[in-house]
Image (spheres, rainbow, N blue to C red):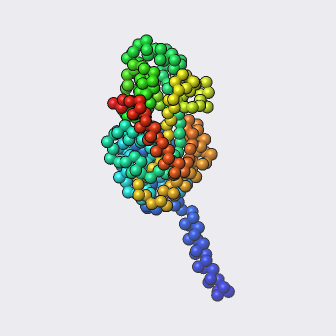
Amino acid sequence: MKSQSRPLIPLLIAICVASTAISQPARAECGQPVKIIVSYPPGSPDDVVARLLAQKLSEAGEKFYVENMPGAGGMIGTAAAARAAPDGCTMVIVNPNFVVQAAIGEKLSYEVPGSFTPVILLISAPETISINPSVAATTIKELVALVKASPGKLNYASPGYGSSPHLASERLFRNTLGLDVVHVPFQGGPPAVTSTVAGHTQILHLALPVVAPLVRDGKLRLLAVADKTRAPEFPDVPTLEEAGVPGHEVGFWNGILVPKGTPDHLVKRRHQQIVQIMSTSEVKDRLRALGYKPVNNSQLQFATHLQTELVKWKGIVRKDAVKTQ
């Protein structure tokens, strides 16, 4: 009997070792937690999406965490990501400002998009035009009439000079509609929203997920959506084209990049991990509840998106002579 039991011992040991390995969370190939850099303050749209992503990725195995590095319209955090080791342990979440800054000729310490490898486009959302409820306008047409009746009296808030909402606002209000409005820049979207809700600024051109809760609470009045179709959340609110201002569709989006030189197998690993998380009903429902449309595309599709966005914003800056300062 003893001679028959001995061969079972190595087998039992092997089974125990295998079971232990399966039950333990997978470690990052670089041997440390994976950092997702957010180049904007806590509470910003990028931060909200990144934290949801980090939470769900961590629950699936490897440890992911968010590090906020705000400043200079997102350039500080993006520069840090470009300098990071290409070992798969650093990712950065970016938005339209990533390409806008290159389009307006900002002096960047990194190349757009050359210093990075695209991983995935996460979400998209339309921009909107909203106002403080104290403003005596319920439509874009009424807002235009009000501003023209009192030139230089009303102002609009933006997340800062050279941001995509700043350029879109200048193109819409000043260049297309010929309005004399005052630009009030802030350090990010949250303070711009706070100022408009308080009535210190009157007009806001920001993404739908940012303003939607405040519109529902009556703290902001939504006048139009800068998209080709109406927002399902607010079916009674017209698009800018329906309001008489075609050609001003502007969208917000978030995507993930890694430093250039990150091995292909690690980039593909990150892409696959994120696809799995973004494909779950829980994550899709949470993003939709916030006003975002989950995208979840391929690396090539995201790379194409970045090039298309860069060309678009360069055209806006040059053709429309949009002021960036």
Locate the C terminus and report the quarter of the image it occupies.
Answer: top left
* 104 or 230: nearer the viewer: 104
Residue 253 to residue 88: above or below: above
| Residue at 41% across, 13% down | 150
Locate the N terminus and report the quarter of the image it occupies.
Answer: bottom right
Residue 244 to residue 231: above or below: above
Residue 182, x across and y down, in percent: 37, 22
Residue at far top of view: 149
Residue 178 placement: quadrant: top left
Residue 63, x across and y down, in percent: 48, 55
| Residue at 50% across, 47% down | 304
Residue 213, x across and y down, in percent: 53, 30
Residue 221, x across and y down, in percent: 52, 22
| Residue at 62% across, 45% down | 281
Residue 199 to residue 166: above or below: above
* 108 or 7: nearer the viewer: 108
